[in-house]
Image (tube, rainbow, N blue to C red):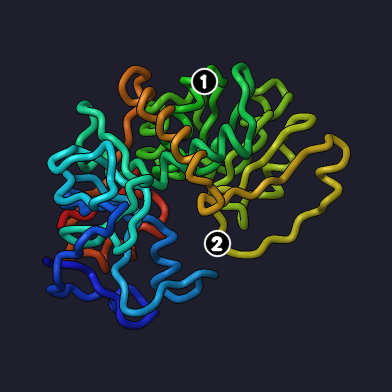
Amino acid sequence: MKAIVVSEFGEPDVMKIADIPIPEPGADQICLKVDSAGVNPVECYVRSGIYPVLPKLPYTPGIDAAGTIAAVGSGVKGWAVGDRVYVTRSISGTYAEYTICHQSMVYTLPENITFCQGAAIGVPGSAAWRSLFYRGQAQPGERLLVHGASGSVGLFAIQLARLAGMEVFGTAGSPAGISLISKNGATRVFNHREEGYQKALMAATDGKGFNLILENLANVNLEKDLEMLSPCGRVIIVGNRGRIEIDPRLTMGKETDIRGMSLFNTTPEEFVRMHAALKGAFEFGGVTPVVSRVLPLEEAVDAHQMVLKDGNLGKIVLKP
């Protein structure tokens, strides 16, 4: 089979196309014939060698994928060859024609969701759900700001929050991003590249601020977020690309919280609950994963360069 193989950590061009054997599933594993594989920023950090936990070289990148089950291990229950599924973690990597996953990380792909969209569920859908409802403790009627909402996690969060009965505000840095956020359910949208947008956001809340902020670029926006929180508000750090200096006093007067979120802390039981909820949202609630670009597997280098840039407007997907 064709797969992307990384033999040394470094820049995107360390990813090479190779012909390797199709992996065989273990007793509690499934082998997925990959139709589409999602590309996530964390895969770039791992490939570059800067992530805290690194795989043994050589390895194949990739966490998210969707396709059909090609083989099942002897201990697998509830799955059969030909089942249409998406996966949220992979043992052998998803930038390949086939991948191996533990059966607990496999979920039925609803008929109204395409394989490309299925590859956009795992990390973005899980991260949005965990940020909103586990770390953020979001409640119906609360006011939410998704700061930098035009990426795949932000778009998921907007749709899920509207479904949960929240008042949803979002920001983006381009007219296309603003339009996409609006189409996906944000009630008010602002351009975070415009001077004074914070004042406009606060004015739109009648000066009350936000109960919950999901922050996708904390190294730029965290202090701004603290200024815009309402009393006892929470800011959830979903994404960060550097250091920032803040005044801790901003948390004191209103007794606000700064909370981190890491998807890798999610337990298997939490994954089951999250994806049961997501399945219902896909089937009945009008939540749809957003795909921005579909590239052939051979263009994985380009995909890694694109995914860390602003303005992706959804998920980048590779086609083996």
Q: Position of residue 195 (x, y in %)?
A: 59, 43
Between 144 and 85, the residue placed more toward the observer is 85
* SS label for mark 1: loop
Q: Which residue is mark 2?
A: 241
Separation of residues labelled 1 and 2 (CA atoms): 30 Å
- Is residue 204 something one can see in this rendering? yes
Q: Which corner quadrant holds the C terminus? A: bottom left
Image quadrant assignment for residue 227: top right
Image position of 67 (left or right of 87): left
Name the residue that disc number 1 marks.
Answer: 164
Q: Residues within 10 Å of mark 1 (few under 14, many from 20)?
A: some
Q: Look at the image and tell me in which quarter the N terminus lies.
A: bottom left
Residue type for callout 1: Ala
Q: Is residue 192 left or right of residue 255?
A: left
Above or below 147: residue 221: below
Along the line of sight, which residue is nearer the eye, 44 or 144? 44
Residue 10 seen in the current view: no
Looking at the image, how many numbered discs can be counted on the residues? Answer: 2
